[in-house]
Image: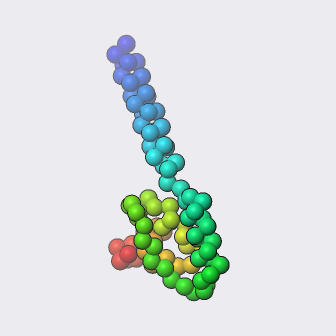
Amino acid sequence: MPGKLLLTVFLVYTLLNAYIYSLDLSSLRVTDEELKALQWVTDNTPPNARFVILNYGDPLTSPIQEWFPALTDRVSLSVIQGYEWLPGEFNRR
């Protein structure tokens, strides 16, 4: 009986923790206003332009930092996602 109770508590705790984490992740998205700004960058800057993105929050969880290169086809000098696979680049950034 104590084993079943412990398992039940563990499962409930795990499910609640996963739910709370998913709510936090769902808030990390590019807003409509940010999409419009990114479209402006694509339409009004040269293809070889380089940018430094300064925004609020942690750069590891910033949707703008992460999506800027993909949505604008421009280089962001401040983006760090993806550089962990290149020797020495992640630490340099």
Most foreground residue, 48 or 12: 48
**Viewer can see residue 21:** yes
Residue 53: image quadrant is bottom left
Residue 61: image quadrant is bottom left
**Viewer can see residue 70:** no
Q: Is residue 41 shown left or right of residue 55? A: right
- Say above or below: 3 vs 55: above
Tell me the quarter of the image containing the C terminus: bottom left
Residue 68: image quadrant is bottom right
- Say above or below: 78 vs 58: below
Write the residue at 57% across / 78% down.
74
Q: Residue furthest right?
A: 43
How many marks the image carries: the answer is 0
Q: Position of residue 34 (x, y in %)?
A: 56, 64
Structure colour scheme: rainbow
- Say above or below: 76 vs 35: below
Write the residue at 34% across / 16% down.
2
Q: Is residue 41 shown left or right of residue 80? A: right
